[in-house]
Image (cartoon, rainbow, N blue to C red):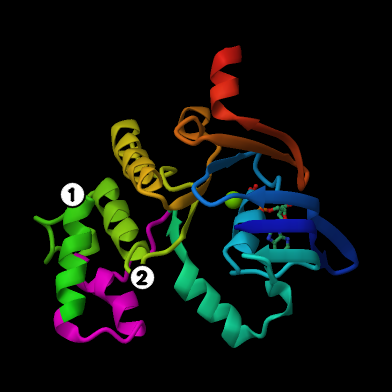
């Protein structure tokens, strides 16, 4: 599904070059559930943002279904993002003035769906993440775990093939984090490819495969089943 070849990402701070990603080679198959771990500053978010086409590499190639998307123009990249990817962030990033239902309706509006269909689909998505009883609530009237479930429903609105989540449980208590991971696991079982960034080892084991980053490079790449066998 995705193939990264020799990806680098450099930032310049005045004269100082920061190499956030250094020669990343990574293949992600359809149906995978990949966790990315590593110390703070190791390049996890940079890698996730490049995978989600929120950021462009300094060099290297990114093949999505065998198309090198580093060659596409901004408008085409936006289309790739909207059609293929769903994003989940640590801080939920809901629109504060919109209800749970309205938050989930936003991407359906951008996709040009008529209002009646937007409402029906948003209700269905919220019910699927256990939020069918909180349609009219504003984000401030919801717990962190509930807000993240609304954010997941919104990320699913346009049937993404790939879910990208940066520390999705980072602000949540253990039990609420486990609920979020169970939802992501169910989605993966239904065929959605999932990539998460976490620094919590217990969260990373919900996935099927774990890569570890250090100083912008992949230093480990293992199946979770293998890791559990060794433990
Ligand atoms: N916009 C930016 N400008 C300059 N340096 C950045 C920028 N974003 C990230 N970096 C640097 O790149 C490295 C990797 O950052 P990041 O991917 O956010 O790490 P992580 O998510 O693993 O904590 C860090 O050294 C960070 O300071
Ligand atoms: Mg980060």
The extreme left residue here reads 133
Residue 43 point in image, percent of width and height: 69, 50
The relative height of residue 188 versus residue 80 in the rendered view (above or below) is above
Which numbered tag is attached to residue 130?
A: 1
Q: Assess mark 2: CB under 8 A from ligand 2? A: no
Residue at screen point 36% across, 65% down: 159
The residue where tag 2 is placed is 158
Q: Earlier in the sequence, mark 1 or mark 2?
A: 1
Categorize mark 1 by other alpha carbons within 10 Å: few (<14), some (14-19), many (20+). some
| Residue stretch in magenta | 91-116
The extreme front residue here reads 66
Residue at screen point 33% across, 34% down: 178
The relative height of residue 75 versus residue 33 in the rendered view (above or below) is below
- Left or right relative to 44: residue 7: right
Residue 101 lies in the magenta-colored region: yes
- Left or right relative to 39: residue 87: left
Q: CA distance from mark 1 to mark 2?
A: 19 Å
Residue 228 point in image, percent of width and height: 54, 18
Residue at screen point 61% across, 13% down: 230
Q: Nearer the viewer, mark 1 or mark 2?
A: 2
Residue 160's quadrant in the figure? bottom left
- Left or right relative to 127: residue 176: right
The relative height of residue 21 versus residue 207 in the rendered view (above or below) is below
Q: Locate the N terminus and report the quarter of the image it occupies.
A: bottom right
Residue 112 point in image, percent of width and height: 31, 87
Q: Quadrant of ligand 1?
A: bottom right
């Amino acid at each position: 599904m995705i193939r990264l070849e020799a990806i680098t990402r450099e930032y310049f701070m005045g004269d100082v070059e920061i190499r956030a990603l250094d020669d990343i080679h990574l293949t992600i198959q359809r149906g995978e559930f990949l966790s990315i771990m590593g110390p703070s500053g190791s390049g996890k978010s940079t890698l996730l943002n490049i995978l989600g086409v929120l950021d462009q590499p300094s060099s290297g190639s990114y093949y999505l279904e065998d198309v090198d998307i580093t060659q596409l123009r901004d408008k085409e990249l936006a289309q790739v993002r909207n059609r293929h990817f769903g994003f989940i962030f640590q801080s939920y990033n809901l629109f504060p003035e919109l209800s749970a239902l309205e938050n989930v309706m936003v991407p359906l509006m951008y996709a040009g769906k008529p209002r009646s269909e937007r409402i029906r689909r948003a209700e269905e998505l919220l019910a699927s993440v256990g939020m069918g009883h909180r349609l009219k609530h504003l984000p401030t009237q919801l717990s962190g775990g509930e807000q993240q479930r609304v954010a997941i429903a919104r990320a699913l609105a346009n049937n993404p093939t790939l879910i990208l989540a940066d520390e999705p449980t980072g602000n949540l208590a253990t039990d609420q984090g486990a609920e979020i991971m169970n939802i992501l696991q169910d989605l993966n079982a239904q065929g959605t490819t999932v990539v998460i960034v976490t620094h919590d080892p217990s969260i990373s084991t919900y996935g099927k495969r774990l890569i570890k980053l250090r100083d912008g490079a992949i230093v480990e790449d293992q199946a979770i089943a293998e890791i559990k066998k060794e433990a």
